[in-house]
Amino acid sequence: DEPTGHKEIFNHAHSSLRGVIERTFGVWKKKWSILRDIPHFPYEKQVEIVIATMALHNYIRRYAQRDIDFDESGNYSSEETSEEMEDNEHDGDGPGRQEIEVLRNAIAQSLMNAST
């Protein structure tokens, strides 16, 4: 069944994008093993490592004829990445909750308008 209503459409789009993001992070961490040991570095170095590996990842995705790691990943979804994302989710009661809800509703309405 196709989602109906702006909240269902938003939730469907959000879920689909989350899968893509989890796959990307999973491939990224698999390709760049330094990311698995990143906590052993000072914070400033961690930032540099993340930026460098993401720049390389984006370069490969943009200019390589084929990104073997990404192509072979299929529907790869890292459980570790998924758990990390869930650990970073907020319960929605913190500061900025109303702003996030307004933004979510605006995105949902935009998706709803685009689907009609």
Image (cartoon, rainbow, N blue to C red):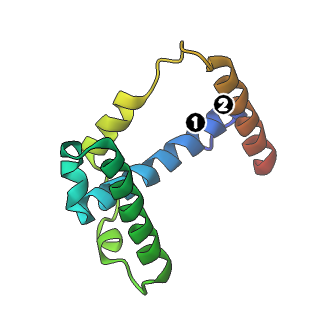
User: Would residue 38 be found to the left or right of residue 52 on screen?
Assistant: left
Q: Position of residue 6 (x, y in %)?
A: 71, 34
Which residue position holds label 2? 7
Q: Residues within 10 Å of mark 1 (few under 14, many from 20)?
A: some
**Residue 68: quadrant of the picture:** bottom left
Secondary structure, mark 1, is helix
Q: CA distance from mark 1 to mark 2?
A: 6 Å
Can residue 89 be seen from the camera position used here? yes
Question: Where does residue 25 sit, x and y in percent of width and height?
Answer: 36, 54
Q: 70 and 62: which one is in front?
A: 62
Q: Amino acid at mark 2?
A: Lys
Give the total of numbered labels.
Answer: 2
Please say if the residues under marks 1 and 2 sit with CB atoms less than 8 Å apart: yes
> Which residue position is annotated with label 1?
11
Identify the element where label 2 is drawn: helix
Q: Position of residue 108 (x, y in %)?
A: 71, 36
